[in-house]
Image (tube, helix red, strand yellow):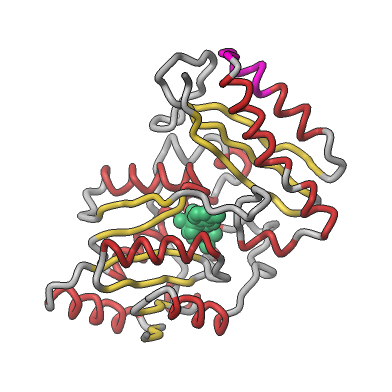
Amino acid sequence: MRIITDIAEMQAAADEARLTGKRVGVVPTMGYLHEGHLNLLRTAREHARFVVLTAFVNPAQFAPNEDFEKYPRDFERDRALAEKAGTDVIFFPSREEMYPNGCETFVEVSHLSQVLEGEFRPTHFRGVTTIVAKLFNCTKPHVALFGQKDAQQAAMIRRMVKDLNFDIEIIVGPIVREADGLAMSSRNVYLSPGERKDALVLSQALHLAKDLISRGEKDTSAIRSAMFLLIAGKPTAAIDYVACVNPETFQTVKALHSGEPVLFLLAVRIGKTRLIDNEIIEVG
Ligand code: AMP
């Protein structure tokens, strides 16, 4: 496994792989790997002969009051885990390598970047789509893998690829959870033992939604109210949003219809840690 920190060297390695007929797959991450990332790497291996993991904590997607400085980092651990998962290259550029002169050019998916997460983190998605576009140009993939954990991000990347004609297949992997249901996240290390218990309320609220729907509830505001009540019962929890949307368009869904799946999404602060989770629910 090679570690590449230089953009020109990364592009040359991707060119060489392409010239020798290998499909190139990329898994963009901010490092501090967990099973969610490793599952994407293993899926990448099924679709590509040359698998690149990018590990870059992207300052452009953090607001000044957010956790850029304290975001967990452990490159040696990531290196060992990535190698075991069958990675060919870790692209690990410095901030100076990616943004030598700041950034004047941004990629923005207008509507999708403004709603839900975008309301609470107004500059976040512009940072995400811009860095992903840059990483695509650095790693020249045929296929790129993202996680359903960040459902809105995945939808935006799909839209960006379509709108800007990137010749890249996008694959979205399922949410990987801890045994008790908590969606894996690099940020889970911030949680104290008490908060870790309260954090279970995100997946429990999604479970409750599924349960109510299976019992015939069709009114999404009734379902969202029940979810709110459950979450509000946890002393450390503060809700940013609980939403029910069309999984493709992200338009709000008010009434459920048989055969039309919906996406429930939520963002909840547990103490100082902001967590997100979601689930696509089939309506019987
Ligand atoms: P991050 O390092 O948190 O920016 O995540 C990098 C990629 O891994 C993104 O495409 C995430 O959606 C994906 N990812 C993060 N956590 C999970 C998870 N628990 N299950 C599946 N994919 C995940």
Q: Residue at x 71, y 64 (%)?
A: 189
Q: Residue at x 67, y 16 (%)?
A: 222
Q: Would you say 2 lies left or right of 47 here?
A: right
Q: Give the magenta part as a residue range.
A: 216-224
Decide: is 53 above or below 171. Answer: below
Q: Residue at x 64, y 17 (%)?
A: 221
Number of marks drawn:
0
Residue furthest to the right in view is 235
Q: Quadrant of residue 47?
A: bottom left
Decide: is 54 above or below 3. Answer: above
Q: Is residue 247 magenta?
A: no
Q: Would you say 198 lies left or right of 144 here?
A: right
Asked whether residue 230 appears in the rendered view, the answer is yes
In front of the other: 235 or 140? 235
Screen quadrant of the N terminus? bottom left
In front of the other: 28 or 181? 181
The image shows residue 44 at horizontal and vertical percentages of: 34, 63
Q: Quadrant of residue 268?
A: top right
The image shows residue 2 at horizontal and vertical percentages of: 36, 86
Q: Quadrant of residue 227?
A: top right
The image shows residue 91 at horizontal and vertical percentages of: 40, 77
The image shows residue 248 at horizontal and vertical percentages of: 39, 32
Asked whether residue 60 appears in the rendered view, the answer is no
In front of the other: 224 or 261? 261
Q: Residue at x 46, y 49 (%)?
A: 174
Q: Is residue 218 magenta?
A: yes
Q: Would you say 85 lies left or right of 19 here?
A: right
